């Protein structure tokens, strides 16, 4: 019987019981014991944080499985197929769908064995529970950040940037453009003969004349609408129906924001 082996570490200097040499020895010892001919042992040393298709070793093995060139895979542990138990089980399922046998030595799993299928189902339940717990912890963490006045979601609003420490700060150049948009629109709103569409068109013309850009491109009416309706600029964050003051510097005053939104094409957004 012929088989491929897979060994993986995230870094070369991991502990002995997960090192490449230890995993290889386990695979070859198992193969010799049960009369498997190991065609090749594929080495995966990239970070398991990457997607399956981006990882060199596993992508090679996946290609072999897809083309029907691999009948059996031997690994030391299921988690060698991915960074987490769930990732390993997902690859195991992929192999099963392509009629490829997977043997995991440590867990005594053989996908051709009915008892192993029962164990795999149990592991699925454990992995899904683990995933749900992680999601719950992440959600709790985001909620706490929001409650503490820190941004925990979405893209960075125009006018802000992140410094070298990853902290949200006011962008000097973009913030001036935001302030100009608010002041110019407020001036245009006092021209009662102008419709909202005309005000926006005139504002877009003014921005183009001054050479102001929205992240390298000319401003669109949608950019204007987003900027004028974004309460983040005057110190307010909205998320999941909740509202709080944030801890970042404001770009416009609350009074300016309210005056503009009495006349602006306003669709209050979560920022």
Image (cartoon, rainbow, N blue to C red):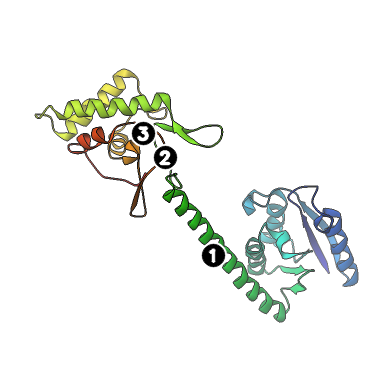
Residue corresponding to mark 3: 250
Q: Position of residue 103 (x, y in %)?
A: 76, 69
Picture coordinates of residue 249, whole percent (x, y)? 40, 33
Q: CA distance from mark 1 to mark 3?
A: 36 Å
Q: Nearer the viewer, residue 35 or 92?
A: 92
Report the side of 221 relative to 34 (left or right).
Answer: left
At a point 63% along the width and 75% down the height, the residue shown is 121
How packed mark 3 is, by other alpha carbons closer than 10 Å (few <14, some 14-19, many 20 or more), is: some
* Residue indicated by mark 1: 132
Residue 219 placement (x, y as % from top left): 33, 30
- Tell me if residue 236 comes above or below residue 80 in the rendering: above
Location of mark 2 (residue): 247
Q: How many marks?
A: 3
Residue 176 in sight in this render? yes
For the N terminus, give its image quadrant. bottom right
> Between marks 2 and 3, how big is the CA–CA gap?
9 Å
């Amino acid at each position: 019987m012929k088989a491929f082996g897979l060994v993986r570490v995230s870094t070369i200097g991991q502990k002995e019981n997960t090192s490449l040499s230890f995993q290889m020895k386990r695979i070859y010892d198992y193969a010799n014991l049960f009369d498997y001919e190991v065609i090749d042992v594929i080495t995966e040393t990239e970070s398991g944080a990457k997607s399956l298709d981006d990882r060199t070793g596993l992508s090679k093995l996946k290609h072999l499985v897809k083309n029907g060139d691999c009948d059996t895979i031997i690994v030391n542990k299921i988690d060698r197929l991915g960074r987490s138990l769930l990732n390993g089980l997902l690859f195991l399922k992929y192999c099963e769908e392509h009629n490829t046998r997977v043997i995991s030595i440590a867990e005594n799993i053989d996908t051709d064995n009915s008892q192993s299928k029962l164990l795999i189902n149990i592991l699925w339940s454990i992995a899904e529970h683990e995933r749900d717990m992680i999601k719950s912890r992440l959600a709790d963490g985001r909620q706490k950040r929001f409650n503490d006045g820190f941004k925990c979601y979405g893209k960075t609003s125009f006018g802000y940037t992140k410094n070298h420490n990853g902290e949200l700060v006011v962008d000097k150049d973009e913030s001036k453009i935001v302030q100009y948009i608010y002041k110019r629109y407020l001036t245009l709103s006092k021209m009662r003969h102008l419709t909202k569409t005309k005000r926006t068109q005139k504002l877009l013309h003014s921005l183009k004349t001054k050479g102001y850009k929205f992240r390298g491109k000319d401003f669109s009416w949608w950019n204007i609408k987003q900027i004028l309706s974004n309460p983040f600029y005057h110190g307010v964050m909205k998320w999941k129906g909740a509202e709080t003051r944030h801890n970042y510097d404001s770009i416009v005053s609350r009074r300016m924001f309210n005056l503009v939104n009495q006349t602006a094409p306003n669709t209050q957004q979560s920022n």
